[in-house]
Image: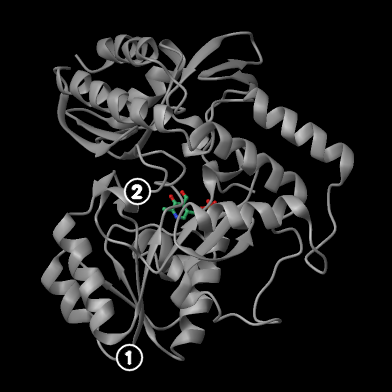
């Protein structure tokens, strides 16, 4: 169907931060499939894990256990909030599970979300995504969502005894890499504690090392009650997860929610391999270092008027049409980036890049924004 505005390019091969199209042209990828290929394209560890698991067992359904899934759940909770995991197949689906869980914990409760947030395209996730252009054609939406500006006082005032949860992205990705202030996050935590509501962080885009820590919440000083994860979790394959702390671990009971494919052994094996690559202190330190270099280099380009972000999740506002820059970068410079708004470029490179890749990207971008 006609729901994507695709570029006239067919990619046929990828390796690390490089892509090749069907005509043999080589590209530098600073988008990573929208923060999915954090481990780089076709990382050998991910490919080997998928190959081995595909030979052993591909699917059994959630009527039975499979070892890669159980061990992945243990690994994810051990490396985050310590509770339990619900597996899904995408970011939107992980958020649907989170929404159902908090509604069950506080029946008919309201869910407070922020202006500028993006949580996915399915009905619950879309109802949490307060953007007129995305919501209006699909009304009526799921009731019980309240959207407030990114302002501590407004958020605090919106949370009351009938609030089930506050759902937010610690850094809003799809609307231009808006880093939420420490004050706003602290107010969200305190407001939820005041009324016994759940604080949910959507880490679909910020997770898996993107911001220089495995999860973005680790650098905020605020610990949420649950996080949702997807995108880079599967090393390029589709998997999502809702990871809870102890407080929300036992809300869902058999029959409450489910998915035929979720937590299948092949995607779980791929996720183990992706975590082997990304949950590495040396790699995460390099993400922080290269993020600083990328941001500083962008600031030096004449057409760049503002730079935001953390780690290798960076946006640059430009003094011209960002979609034009993106198209010229692709066709003239063979640099893959995207635009989140009319004047905002976004950079989400694979996290396995080196300094030379950053300098190469800046070199390709410079003639387009000078
Ligand atoms: N949440 C956030 C923060 C996202 O950035 C996205 C996708 O861009 C989603 C949810 C939806 O994820 P998916 O496209 O896998 O459903």
Q: Is residue 194 above or below residue 67?
A: below
**Residue bearing mark 1:** 162
The answer to whether residue 315 is left or right of residue 275 is left
Residue situated in front as seen by the camera: 354 or 99: 354
SS for callout 1: loop
Residue situated in front as seen by the camera: 365 or 184: 184
Within 10 Å of the Cα at label 2, are there few (<14), some (14-19), or many (20+) other Cα atoms? many
Q: Which percent across, then down, holds residue 360?
A: 36, 10
Measured Cα–Cα span from mark 1 to mark 2: 28 Å
Indicate the quadrant where residue 20 lies.
Answer: top right
Q: Which percent across, then down, holds residue 37?
A: 54, 33
SS for callout 2: helix
**Callout 1–callout 2 Cβ contact below 8 Å:** no
Residue 139 seen by the camera: no
Residue situated in front as seen by the camera: 15 or 7: 15
**Residue bearing mark 2:** 216
Look at the numbered disc 2 and say if its residue's Cβ is closer than 8 Å to ligand 1.
Answer: no
Considering the image in quadrants, where does the C terminus appear? top left
Q: How is the image coloured?
A: one colour
Q: Which percent across, then down, holds residue 66?
A: 79, 56
**Residue drawn at (53%, 77%) of the image:** 100
């Amino acid at each position: 169907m006609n729901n994507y505005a695709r570029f006239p390019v067919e990619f046929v091969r990828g390796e690390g931060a490089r892509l090749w199209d069907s005509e043999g042209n080589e590209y530098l990828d600073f988008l990573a499939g929208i923060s999915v290929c954090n481990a780089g394209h076709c990382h050998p560890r991910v490919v080997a894990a998928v190959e081995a698991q595909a030979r052993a067992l591909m699917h059994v359904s959630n009527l039975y256990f499979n070892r890669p899934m159980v061990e992945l759940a243990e690994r994810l909770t051990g490396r985050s909030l310590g509770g339990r995991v619900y597996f899904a197949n995408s970011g939107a689906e992980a958020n649907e599970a989170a929404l159902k869980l908090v509604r069950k914990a506080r029946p008919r409760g309201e869910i407070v979300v922020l202006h500028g947030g993006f949580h996915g395209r399915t009905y619950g996730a879309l109802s949490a995504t307060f953007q007129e252009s995305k919501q209006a054609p699909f009304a009526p939406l799921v009731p019980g969502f309240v959207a407030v500006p990114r302002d501590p006082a407004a958020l605090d005032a919106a949370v009351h005894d009938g609030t089930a949860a506050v759902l937010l992205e610690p850094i809003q990705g799809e609307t231009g890499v808006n880093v939420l202030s420490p004050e706003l996050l602290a107010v969200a935590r305190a407001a939820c504690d005041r009324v016994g509501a759940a604080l949910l962080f959507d880490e679909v885009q910020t997770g898996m090392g993107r911001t220089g820590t495995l999860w973005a919440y680790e650098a905020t000083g605020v610990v949420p009650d649950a996080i949702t994860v997807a995108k880079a979790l599967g090393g390029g394959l589709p998997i999502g997860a809702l990871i809870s702390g102890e407080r929300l671990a036992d809300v869902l009971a058999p029959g409450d929610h489910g998915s035929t494919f979720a937590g299948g052994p092949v995607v779980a094996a791929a996720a183990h391999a992706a975590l082997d690559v990304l949950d590495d202190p040396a790699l995460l330190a390099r993400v922080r270092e290269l993020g600083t270099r990328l941001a500083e280099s962008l600031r030096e380009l004449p057409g760049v008027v503002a730079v935001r972000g953390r780690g290798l999740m960076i946006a640059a506002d430009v003094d011209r049409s960002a979609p034009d820059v993106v198209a010229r970068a692709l066709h003239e410079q063979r640099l893959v980036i995207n635009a989140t708004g009319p004047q905002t470029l976004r950079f989400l490179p694979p996290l396995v890049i080196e300094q030379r890749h950053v300098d190469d990207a800046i070199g390709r971008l410079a003639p387009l924004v000078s």
